[in-house]
């Protein structure tokens, strides 16, 4: 390649790169402007009725318990008993801006608390299930993971650790059933869950 051709190709590449950078900057600026426009609209949205929002109702009897003095198990059971006394709602489908647009800026704080209470509830269910697993209470661990999934947990680890409990209980058929349920569903991390579950089943 001659020097002239090399210089020409270099100039073309530099010009193309500059064009792509300008295009990316314009796109980024547009997204930013649109976001702040929606945020401003959200911050000026008047309060709307939130009485129709379905609050999660969990009975204390649903929380799996075991005859044990293991402190971590008792701790998370107590935390869960406290959780279910608080108003909880799964609002994960909303961003902060969406939440204000949908229900008004004045309701944002209380709705955020509902959502935070719900997430804390799911976290404590997962923690209780792990505490049961560590103490080899596998039926209770299984039931706790199932409860977490029933109430909307989306964590891949909850599915994986549930499958591991099934193996400990010599119930591989339940892993196969779980794989089918996930495969037929619309979980946002479906492929990651399926890969994980199949890996657990293959180790049986």
Image (tube, rainbow, N blue to C red):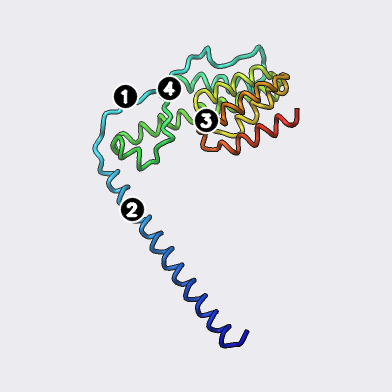
Q: Would you identify the image quadrant in which residue 177 lies?
A: top right
The residue that disc 1 covers is: 52
* Label 4 – label 3 distance at C-alpha: 22 Å
Q: Which tag, 2 or 4, sits closer to the chain's start?
A: 2
The quadrant the C terminus occupies is: top right
104 or 172: nearer the viewer: 172
Q: Is residue 8 above or below residue 140?
A: below
Q: Are marks 2 and 1 in contact (CB under 8 Å)?
A: no
Q: CA distance from mark 2 to mark 1?
A: 30 Å
3 vs 1, front mark: 3
Q: Secondary structure at mark 4?
A: loop
Number of the label disc, if any, that sits on residue 185: 3
Viewer-side label of 2, 3:
3
Marker disc for residue 56: 4
What's the residue at 30%, 40% (across, down)?
101
Check the image and report above or below for 180 versus 68: below
Q: Which mark is residue 172?
A: none
**Quadrant the N terminus occupies:** bottom right
Q: CA distance from mark 2 to mark 4?
A: 34 Å
Q: Which element type, helix, strand or loop, lies under badge 1? A: loop
> Which residue carries the number 2 mark?
34
Residue in the image at 32% along x and 39% along y = 100
């Amino acid at each position: 390649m001659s020097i002239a051709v090399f210089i020409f190709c270099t100039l073309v590449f530099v010009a193309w790169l500059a064009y792509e950078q300008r295009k990316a900057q314009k796109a980024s600026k547009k997204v930013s402007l649109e976001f702040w426009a929606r945020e401003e609209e959200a911050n000026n949205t008047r309060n709307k009725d939130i009485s129709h929002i379905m609050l999660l109702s969990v009975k204390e009897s649903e929380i799996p318990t075991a005859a044990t003095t293991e402190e971590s198990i008792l701790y998370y059971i107590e935390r869960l008993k406290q959780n279910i006394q608080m108003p909880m709602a799964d609002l994960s489908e909303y961003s902060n801006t969406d939440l204000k647009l949908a229900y008004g800026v004045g309701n944002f704080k209380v709705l955020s608390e509902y959502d935070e209470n719900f997430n804390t509830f799911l976290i404590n269910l997962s923690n209780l299930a792990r505490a049961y697993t560590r103490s080899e209470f596998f039926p209770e661990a299984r039931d706790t993971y199932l409860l977490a999934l029933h109430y909307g947990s989306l964590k891949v680890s909850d599915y994986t650790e549930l499958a591991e409990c099934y193996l400990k209980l010599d119930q591989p058929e339940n892993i196969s059933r779980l794989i089918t349920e996930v495969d037929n569903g619309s979980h946002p991390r479906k492929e990651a869950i399926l890969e994980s579950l199949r890996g657990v089943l293959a180790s049986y």
